[in-house]
Amino acid sequence: MLIKRVYNNNVVLVTDDSGAECVAVGRGLAFSKRAGDEVDQSMVEKVYTLDSEENRTRFENLIKSIPVEYLTIADEIVSMVQRESDLHVGNNLLIALADHISLSLERERAGVPCENPLLMEIKQFYKREFALARRAAGIIHERMGIWISEGETGFIALHIVNATMGQRADVLVLSIRMIQDILDIVSRDFSITYDEESIQYERFLRHLQFFAQRVLGEDSKQSEDTFLFNLGKDQYPAALACAEKIGAYVAGTYGRSVTDAEKGYLVYHIMNLVHATASGLSTGERSTE
């Protein structure tokens, strides 16, 4: 590998044997090196392939301003997420985490409290991602000797969600508020209290996560299959009325229309949830009807 650009003593931009650009990391890797020099392969600890010009620019800007240890920690967290879950994450998460680790450690050292107004919703709606973020906090503590706050941990969970769902951070924040409001609408309409450990609640929550992504995403496309909507008109008028209320809420609050097909899917999930609540089904149980 030939060095194309030296970022610091530990990080260089290189071209591999195929001519592709990569970032090579290793302690002292670039000491006394310059563009055009050969990389000492024995000193390379990690190689990152940046899949877009945007990621390359973000990486370049980041690596100039943070210690290489933060990149190493972020890489370890990404590996942990890949190892401990079925989530597909890559360089987007690596860059976001390295940046966040830098900022969060600065705040912790300065004793500046982290305000995370979405912490409760993150813990409720993204339990898996928050559990992984807790593991990430443990890695940070192990490497740096500092425990980050629960609020910071919640932001790491959001970075994981962003990386897996392909949402912008601002859209994700709107999604969380939308999900909470829709859950409140259904709870009030049917006078139910959710069993957050039930399979039906988990399915509804997961549906709402993707529903919000489809409704709020600039390039997302909503379903147009109206079979469930038409079925709801005939058999589940109360659930359909609730779905219509949700559609009106989305239009009034976010200026986005909800198709009849999307309302039909809401009817399906609402009925499953209401039926499970009324029947007292618990985690792992299935209706025989």
Image: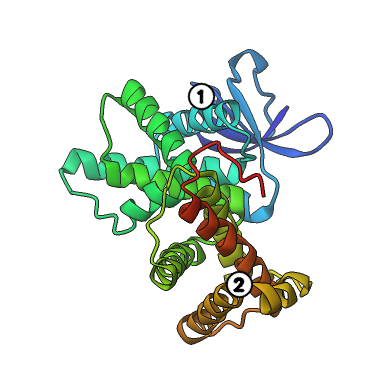
Q: Residue at x 61, y 68 (%)?
A: 267
The residue lying toward the viewer, choosing from 119 and 285, is 285
Numbered badge on residue 229: none
| Coloring basis for residues | rainbow
Q: Residue at x 60, y 42 (%)?
A: 286
Q: Is residue 233 left or right of residue 185?
A: right
Q: Are marks 1 and 2 in contact (CB under 8 Å)?
A: no
Say which of 51 and 120 sits in front. Answer: 120
Residue 263: image location, x then y, percent? 64, 74
On the question of residue 65 being in view, the answer is no
Instruction: Single out the mark in the foreground, 1 or 2.
Output: 2
Q: Say left or right for 218 vs 282.
A: right
The residue that appears at 48% across and 81% down in the rendered structure is 249
Total count of labels: 2
Element carrying mark 1? loop
Q: Determine which of the numbered discs, if any, sits on residue 215 in the image.
A: 2
Density class for disc 1 (Cα within 10 Å; few <14, some 14-19, many ≥20) is few
**Is any part of residue 40 visible from this angle?**
yes
Number of residues whose C-alpha sits closer than 10 Å to that of mark 2, classed few (under 14), some (14–19) or many (20 or more): many
Q: Position of residue 155 (x, y in %)?
A: 38, 49
> Which residue is rendered at x = 50% and y = 27% of the image?
76
Q: Given the image, on which type of amino acid does mark 2 rest?
A: Val
Q: State the residue in front, 268 or 171.
A: 268
Q: Nearer the viewer, residue 62 or 143?
A: 143
Q: Amino acid at mark 1?
A: Phe
Q: Residue furthest left?
A: 111
Circle on res. 31: 1
Q: Which label's residue is closer to the chain start, 1 or 2? A: 1
